[in-house]
Amino acid sequence: MINILVVEDEKKVSAFIQQGLKEVGYEVETAESPGIARELIRSKKFDLLILDVMLPEMSGMDFAKELRANGHNGFILMLTALSTTKDKIQGLDSGADDYLAKPFEFEELLARVRALIRRKSDDKAQLRNGDLIMDLITRNVTRDGIRIELTTKEFSLLEFLMRNQEKVMDRSAIARQVWGADFDPDSNVIDVYINHLRKKIDSPYPKKILKTVVGQGYVLNKID
């Protein structure tokens, strides 16, 4: 059984999400504040948190940062009325795995939830490319034995590229798999994250593996 926690202070929205997800077979609990959510998380393992940005006590972004700092490795889907590129980057960098703007249709929310749950079931323990190693359980990344600190979204982007080594992945595929079905593939968010990732996994090393294929997309080459 997949356990989901909805952290949302608007009772109508929370009840709407809870009812819809229960009807399709998920186990769903709700919390109106980060304080209540903390108590539930201490007593039960949740596979997915659906987290509103605007919450009492502290923002959803700050709560996501706190959870990640304390070792929470479940998926986080962030809900917010803020939808600029800057807002999305801040939300994803705070620790969210996906980001859904309000208002939304339930079918869209359900598609995001299912995509995240599929990622959980598809996980292998490690992904390797030469001396570049991703541990999907501890979420540690190393190259040449040196640990590389990645944000949650950088980790997801690298994971997608690692699963598709030596394949040119176009912007639409990256947008769909890493950010969700309705993410604009022409957004410069993809470029921002590719550049961040390149600086971390490529720039310090003589062998460069993350390449831009002009007019086509990006490819992660294998390390000989």
Image (cartoon, rainbow, N blue to C red):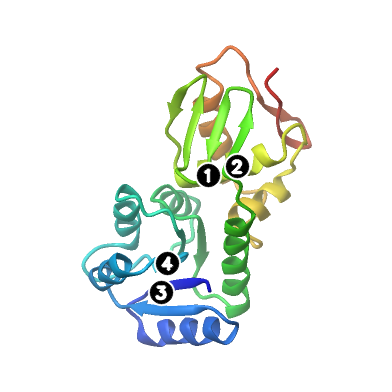
Given contact means CB atoms under 8 Å apart, are the residues at marks 3 and 1 in contact? Answer: no
**Of 164 and 108, the residue lying toward us:** 164
Q: Splitting the image into 4 quarters, where does residue 46 fall?
A: bottom left
Vertical placement of residue 16 versus 85, above or below: below
Classify mark 3: helix, strand or loop: strand
Residue type at mark 3 is Val
Depicted 177 relative to depicted 188: above or below: below
Q: Amino acid at mark 4?
A: Phe
Spatial CA span between label 3 and label 1: 24 Å
Label 2 near label 3: C-beta < 8 Å? no
Amino acid type, label 2 = Glu
Can you give x and y, in whole percent of width and height, for residue 51 in the image?
40, 67
The image position of residue 56, as x and y in percent, is 24, 71
Question: Of callouts 3 and 2, which one flags the residue occurring earlier in the amino acid sequence?
Answer: 3
User: In the picture provided, is 19 more to the left or to the right than 112?
Assistant: left
Residue at 72 percent of width and 34 percent of height: 165
Q: Earlier in the sequence, mark 3 or mark 4?
A: 3
- Residue behind mark 1: 136
Percent x, y of residue 76: 45, 60
Q: Quadrant of the C terminus?
A: top right
| Secondary structure at numbered mark 2 | helix
Q: Say whether residue 194 is visible.
A: yes
Q: Earlier in the sequence, mark 1 or mark 4?
A: 4
Q: For numbered disc 1, what is the local secondary structure?
A: loop
Location of mark 3 (residue) = 6
Location of mark 4 (residue)? 46
Estimate the spatial distance between the alpha carbons at disc 1 and disc 2, rounded to whole Å: 9 Å
